[in-house]
Image (spheres, helix red, strand yellow):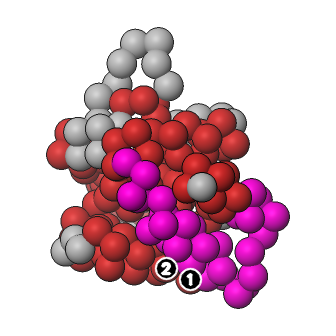
């Protein structure tokens, strides 16, 4: 009887470890799929990494730089809340007239791009400059409106950091 219990114990331990290995493989596959989605979005939106160049300089689409700017504005208070995420998606969809699936892809890529710099203030400055260079000064009123809407999404008021971003945009618009 004790031999039968030992054999069952060994089988149970083996089954447990096989289950664990499969779960790890599934989780790894999910992470790799997400990474592939980001790479595909980067290619689709015209992002190119260049040696010795800031990630913001690799953006060739003003929608991408504007979306990354909105992500950074939402992250100024510590993270992106559900209300801020919904507002970013709403702003991107309404201003850029994009379908919902493409907006979600743009948002995920913008989150990745926004986190490529260790200095958010420098990234904000570079993204503003890049958006204006790619889209022209005509993009500034829409950009100011979008930043303001995202800044107010969580609490209804603008943080000091968001107000500074809006002031930078207004100075360029003057």
161 drawn magenta: yes
Q: Residue at x 36, y 18 (%)?
A: 50
Q: Is residue 8 left or right of residue 42?
A: right
Asked if residue 74 can be seen in this view, the reply is yes
Classify 10 Å Cα crowding around label 1: few (below 14), some (14-19), many (20 and above).
Answer: some
- For disc 1, the marked residue is 83
How far apart marks 1 and 2 lie (CA) works out to 6 Å
Q: Position of residue 16 (x, y in %)?
A: 40, 58
Question: Label 2 crowding class (10 Å Cα cut-off): few <14, some 14-19, many 20+?
Answer: many
Q: Secondary structure at mark 1?
A: helix
Which residue reaches farthest front?
Answer: 174
| Most distant residue in the top direction | 52
Q: Residue at x 22, y 65 (%)?
A: 102
Rendered view: 134 above or below 86: above
101 left or right, relative to 27: left
Residue 127 forms part of the magenta stretch: no
User: Measured from the top left, where is residue 22 in percent x and y?
Assistant: 30, 53
User: Measured from the top left, where is residue 138 in percent x and y?
Assistant: 39, 58
Which span of residues is magenta-colored?
A: 136-165
Q: Is residue 78 visible?
A: no
Reading the image, the residue beneath label 2 is 87
Q: Left or right: 117 with respect to 8?
A: right
Camera-nearest residue between 128 and 44: 128
Quarter of the image containing the N terminus?
bottom left
User: What SS does tag 2 mark?
Assistant: helix
Residue 63, compared with residue 80, is above or below; it is above
Q: Residue at the location (74% across, 64% down)?
A: 163
């Amino acid at each position: 009887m004790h031999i039968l219990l030992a054999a069952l114990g060994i089988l149970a331990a083996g089954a447990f470890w096989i289950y664990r290995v499969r779960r790890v493989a599934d989780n790894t596959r999910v992470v790799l799929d997400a990474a592939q989605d980001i790479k595909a979005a980067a290619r689709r939106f015209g992002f190119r990494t260049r040696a010795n160049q800031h990630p913001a300089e690799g953006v060739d689409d003003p929608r991408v730089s504007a979306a990354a700017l909105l992500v950074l504005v939402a992250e100024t208070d510590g993270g992106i809340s559900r209300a801020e995420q919904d507002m970013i998606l709403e702003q991107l969809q309404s201003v850029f007239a994009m379908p919902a699936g493409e907006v979600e892809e743009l948002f995920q890529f913008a989150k990745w791009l926004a986190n490529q710099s260790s200095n958010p203030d420098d990234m904000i400055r570079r993204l503003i400059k890049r958006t204006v260079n790619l889209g022209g000064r005509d993009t500034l009123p829409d950009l100011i409106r979008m930043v303001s809407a995202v800044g107010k999404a969580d609490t209804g008021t603008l943080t000091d950091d968001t107000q500074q971003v809006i002031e930078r945009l207004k100075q360029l618009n003057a």
